[in-house]
Structure formats: structure tokens, C-alpha cells
Amino acid sequence: DAGITQSPRHKVTETGTPVTLRCHQTENHRYMYWYRQDPGHGLRLIHYSYGVKDTDKGEVSDGYSVSRSKTEDFLLTLESATSSQTSVYFCAISARTNEGHEAFFGQGTRLTVV
Amino acid sequence: DAKTTQPNSMESNEEEPVHLPCNHSTISGTDYIHWYRQLPSQGPEYVIHGLTSNVNNRMASLAIAEDRKSSTLILHRATLRDAAVYYCILKRGAQKLVFGQGTRLTINP
């Protein structure tokens, strides 16, 4: 199994509070991604990173920010959590992004905003 | 972006082969066909990918039509552990993986 650890695995938080989810990898892969998964929408890309301090937005980035100060860590922050951000969040890593390169996913973080 | 069409659900029996279809009639010449699966309560898992030729690995086989407008993921001998949602994804160059709804595969004992 690829060395990806997401923390926490489960979190319940209140509306309006800041939340940070962490993705840690031991593979030294360059690319890291945050997805969210909701019923009826499948997996949607929030943000991704193509190197230390290099990040970009995905299709559903509003309300989220990310940071990558080290190769191994990619943080996803909800500055002020809303109920619409209740979801399962998955981190993924890949060594390259060319056509044939596979991505490895973490186990997910289930976030509930009440 | 080229899209894929998969059946919402399929059912098969344990120890039998399973053929999961995927249509991608608007595929371009540089699109690779990727398959991922997601077991219950887990993150997606890479299964296989190909461009034009059929591909085999320890998990499955990928059969690609000659015109590349469709492909089939083949599980040669399904087990209960193969029950999952299977995603067929077209990927071009440095594009990010875009997941559709996939096919929910049920395996009967």
C-alpha cells in the first residue's frame, strides 16, 4: 500500500469554525490532491499541488485553502466551515501526471459540520 | 472533455468472470483509458490503464475496441472482495482524474 495517511479520520465541527485536514505521504511523490466525495456527485477535485509551495485550484475550491510547505504534507483548510462542506475528503498522490501514471488515494476523512 | 458512459450497476456470481463495459465514443487519440475501483469505506484504488492495446495485470484485463470507442474491464474470477464501484476514466496528458458515477458491482456468493 502507498504510504498515505490522512488525519483526522473522523471529525465533527461546528459551523463557522476553522478546520484543517492533513495528508501525509512517505513516497516522496511530487503531486498531491484533495478530493471530496458526496452522494450524487462522485469525487470532485478541490485543490492540487505540483510541488512545495506550488498549488492550484480544482473544480470545487470555493471555501477551501491549501498549503504545502514540505513534500510530504498537504494541508486542506476550511476557514469557516459550513454545513455544505460535510463530506468525505480524500487525499491522493502521484509521482507524475502524464497519461499512464496512477494515483494512490488515502483512506479518507469523514467531516461533519453541524 | 471526453466523457464515459457506464451502467449504474451490475451483478455477478462469485468465481465467475465479470465484464464491465465503458463507452467513450468521443475519445481522442491521446486519451488514455484508466480504471479505478472504490471498495466500501475506502479511497479509490488504481486497477489498470491502456491506450490502444489490450492490457493485463494481476488484478484485471482491459480490452479496448479497435476503434477505441469502448472498452471492457474483465475480472477473470470474481471474489466477494471485488464488490466495489468501478470507474472508467479518460485521461489526457497532465489532466487531473475526473470521476463519474461509475458502476456498482455486486458479487453474489
Image (cartoon, rainbow, N blue to C red):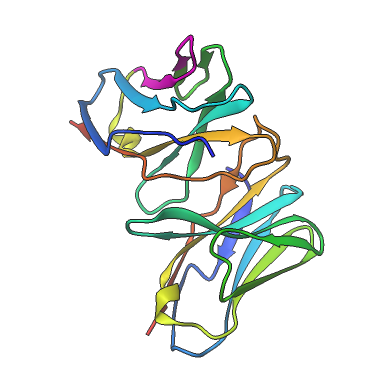
Is residue B72 depicted above or below A31 in this figure?
A: above
Is residue A10 depicted above or below B90 in this figure?
A: below
Residue B15: percent from the left, percent from the top?
26, 20
Report the quarter where the C terminus of chain A lies. bottom left
**Labels in figure, total:** 0
In magenta stretch: residue B24:
no
Residue A62: percent from the left, percent from the top?
57, 72
Asked which quadrant contains residue A13, the reply is bottom left
Q: Nearer the viewer, residue A84 or A31?
A: A84
Q: Residue furthest top?
A: B66
For residue B20, side relative to residue B14 (left or right): right
Q: Residue at x 54, y 86 (%)?
A: A80
Is residue A69 depicted above or below B49 in this figure?
A: below
Residue A89: percent from the left, percent from the top?
49, 63
Q: Nearer the viewer, residue A90 or B1?
A: B1
Q: Which residues are magenta?
A: B63-76
Asked which quadrant contains residue A52, the reply is bottom right
Residue B88: percent from the left, percent from the top?
44, 33
Do we see residue B106 in this rendering? Answer: no
Q: Nearer the viewer, residue B31 or A2?
A: B31
Q: Nearer the viewer, residue A58 or B63?
A: A58
Report the quarter where the N terminus of chain A lies. top right
In magenta stretch: residue B64:
yes
Q: Residue at x 59, y 28 (%)?
A: B31
For residue B19, side relative to residue B28 (left or right): left
Do we see residue A69 in this rendering? Answer: yes
Q: Residue at x 72, y 47 (%)?
A: A27
For residue B12, side relative to residue B40 (left or right): left
For residue A31, side relative to residue B87 (left or right): right
Asked which quadrant contains residue B71, the reply is top left
